[in-house]
Image (cartoon, grey):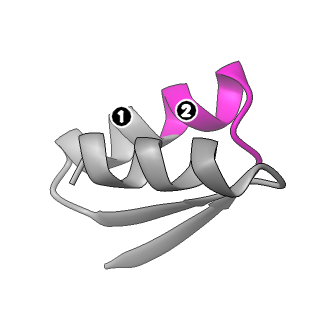
Amino acid sequence: MNIAIIGSGSWGVALSIYLAKQKHNVKIWSFAEDERDLINILFK
């Protein structure tokens, strides 16, 4: 399942990690583009 998380704060990242470990395809949206890209690349 494809899931988008809006917000890259502590809850958004925690939820994203949890969902990714459950084999979901997760993308994080963040106002800061460099932060968003780093998170999305590291947790691919």
Q: What x and y, as percent, mark residue 30?
A: 74, 53
Q: Say what amino acid the circle numbered 2 marks.
A: Val
Q: Which residue is mark 2?
A: 13
Q: Which residue ends up furthest to the top in the rendered image?
A: 10
Classify 10 Å Cα crowding around label 2: few (below 14), some (14-19), many (20 and above): some
Q: Is residue 13 above or below residue 29?
A: above
34 or 20: which is nearer to us? 34
Picture quarter containing residue 9? Answer: top right
**Residue 8 is one of the magenta-drawn residues:** yes
Q: Which residue ends up furthest to the right in the rendered image?
A: 31
Report the residue at 15% width, 57% height from top: 23
Q: Which residue is mark 1?
A: 18
Q: Is residue 34 above or below residue 11?
A: below
Report the residue at 51% width, 26% height from top: 14
Tell me which label, 1 or 2, sits earlier in the chain: 2
Can you tell which of label 1 and label 2 is closer to the viewer?
2
Query: Could you tell me if the residues under marks 1 and 2 are in contact, i.e. CB atoms within 8 Å?
Result: no
Q: Which residues are magenta?
A: 7-15
The quadrant the N terminus occupies is bottom left
Q: What x and y, as percent, mark residue 34?
A: 60, 49
Q: Is residue 31 above or below residue 4?
A: above
Residue 38 appears left or right of 5 = left
The quadrant the C terminus occupies is bottom left
Classify 10 Å Cα crowding around label 1: few (below 14), some (14-19), many (20 and above): few
